[in-house]
Image: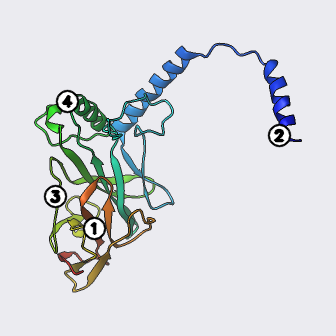
Amino acid sequence: MTKDEIALLLADAAHEVEIGGAPVEAVVRAGRRRKARRRAATAVTAVVLAGGMGTLALDGMPGPGDSVSPAKSASPDGRLVYEPEITEVAFGTHGGVEWGVTVQVWPAPRDRAEAVVQTKAMKDWGLTPVTSGSPSDLVGKTSYFVSHLSGSSDEVTSRRLVTFDSTSELPRPKGADIRVLPQPLAKDDGPLRLVIGTVATTAKQVACHWKDGSTTLADLASQNSALHSTDAVIRPVRGYPTANWFVCLAPGSTTYKSAQVTK
């Protein structure tokens, strides 16, 4: 059949259809119930390891893809102050334990109204910004939260905030500057086998040295490059243009000794 013939058939069918009023109240009630369930789920568990994928997935989190999420206005420049930029820096498996490192960046609110919206959104994620308690403290400040998760595809056994801050000026390392945050891989008091940190955006390689004498090299990944399981990488983070984040995982059972920019 031609397009014109199909169009005529559809038009004839449309004339025979009787359309009633939209169930607006029912839709609104269903949306409210789903929103309440979503927030309850968020309070119980915010992040889980995705089975079989090796990547981190967010469960029960409000977001733009939710068809019943209430519409919210963006900032004049198009920024969504109620939604963070999330970058998964690295993920993998070590000794049967799945792990991942993510950086979440919230743009700086321009006024108190935006700050109030952002504070409520952070609360939905189970996050508390670095302020005195007043939303006004967030005006003009970018907030970031770095999380390390470990466990299995069935259960997250550890979710740890590695570092977080709300600041009017993000750190801007230069040259061979490096900030290192060694972390246990699983238990809070375990051996330091996971290294997380920042380097200048010009840095192309970081060498992580371990106490057994071995070295792991983390190389710079290109912007928006495909994610894959890795023991070491340097990656740009969306919303954090002043520095890049890197991750190194210790081989075997050794632990952290030192790290340096080598390129």
Which numbered disc, 3 or 4, marks the residue that appears first in the sequence? 4
- Give the Cα separation between the discs numbered 2 and 3: 59 Å
Q: Of the residues under marks 4 and 2, which one precedes in the sequence?
A: 2
Mark 3 residue type: Pro
Q: Position of residue 193 (x, y in %)?
A: 25, 70
Q: Residue at x 45, y 23 (%)?
A: 32
Q: Amino acid at mark 2?
A: Lys
x and y percent of residue 259 in the render?
A: 19, 76
Q: CA distance from mark 4 to mark 2?
A: 54 Å
**Within-10-Å neighbours for mark 4: few <14, some 14–19, many 20+:** some
x 33%, y 71%: residue: 233
Q: CA distance from mark 3 to mark 4?
A: 24 Å
| CB atoms of marks 2 and 1 within 8 Å | no
Measure the C-alpha gap from mark 2 to mark 1: 55 Å
Rendered image: mark on residue 3? 2
x%, y% of residue 166?
A: 17, 46
Which residue is found at the position 84% from the left and 30% from the top? 8
Residue that carries the numbered disc 3 in the rendered image: 171
* First in residue order: circle 2 vs circle 3: 2
In the rendered view, tell whether residue 96 sits above or below residue 135. below
Residue annotated with mark 1: 246
Measure the alpha-carbon separation of dots 1 and 3: 15 Å
Q: How far from the left and from the top, in percent, is residue 110?
A: 22, 36
Tell me if label 1 and label 3 are in contact, CB under 8 Å: no
**Is 77 situated left or right of 141 in this image?**
right
Residue type for callout 1: Phe
Residue identifier under label 4: 112
